Amino acid sequence: MKPTDSVTDSKADSDARPVRSRDPERTKQDILDVATMEFAAHGLAGGRVDAIAAKTQTTKRMIYYYFESKENLYALVLERAYAGIRRIEEHMDLDRLDPETALRRLVEFTFDYHDAHPEFVRLVAIENIHNAAHVKASRAVRETNRPALMVVKNLLSRGLQAGVFKRNLDPVDLHLMISAMCYYRVSNRQTFGTIFECDLNEPKLRERQRRMITDAVALFMMSAD
């Protein structure tokens, strides 16, 4: 197999430093970990395979051997980023909670995950710049995200049947509402904080906004249309 890089890196691997022997699967995971931060920081075009190789004590040739190209590595990073949040959502066991508590728990989790994983937010923003080209090409991303709507759909159904929720929203709409508010404060943290002279990482402000967003979604769902 000949390594290729369709964006900026050349095929040549000029780095002759020694590479320590290790388990191939662990090596792949290490590369994906570092590539996640590299692409989140610099985007697809700006991310450097040389930098990823240096930080993982591998070589460009080895990275191309495992992942074939920089674009393919980026696509796998994106798939894994979505899988991370969805995997936790699926195992939250919200059905054991009453609908209002379950909804609040879902909002709080979404808030906390976005806040703790700005690299996920940046990767999503970068993929939007690419008009979701890699998401469109990835069946894995679509399959991974499908259960997220089922979680919301089941929660909506239980809440409506119990008379707790007053709004019969489409699951996509509720998912959008929750994601939008949690995503925005991370994606726009720097510009928002600079313009309005506030630090969105400050613990008291973070907790206030977490409570505000959770209350806003819950109260909206429990109020009459």
Image: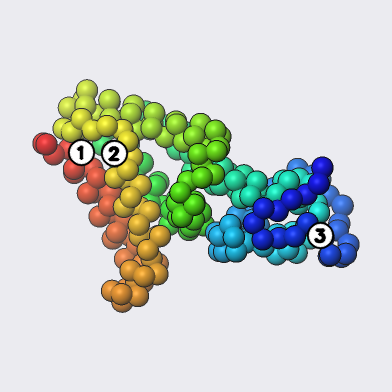
Q: Residue at x 67, y 61 (%)?
A: 8
Q: Secondary structure at mark 2?
A: helix
Please rate how many residues cluster around mark 3, counting C-alpha atoms within 10 Å: few if below 14, some from 14 to 19, many from 20. few
Taking the view exactly as shown, the residue that stands out farthest to the top is: 161
Tell me how far mark 3 sits from mark 2, CA to CA.
Answer: 49 Å
Q: Quadrant of the N terminus?
A: top right
Marking on residue 174: 2
Residue 132's x, y, as percent? 47, 46
Question: Which numbered disc, 3 or 1, marks the residue that appears first in the sequence?
Answer: 3
Question: Of 157 and 76, which appears nearest the observer?
Answer: 76
Q: Residue at x 88, y 64 (%)?
A: 16
Q: Which residue is mark 3?
A: 12
Q: Is residue 27 visible?
A: no
* Mark whose residue sits in front, 3 or 2: 3
Q: Which residue is mark 1?
A: 221
Residue 212's x, y, as percent? 25, 55
Report the side of 106 relative to 138 (left or right). left
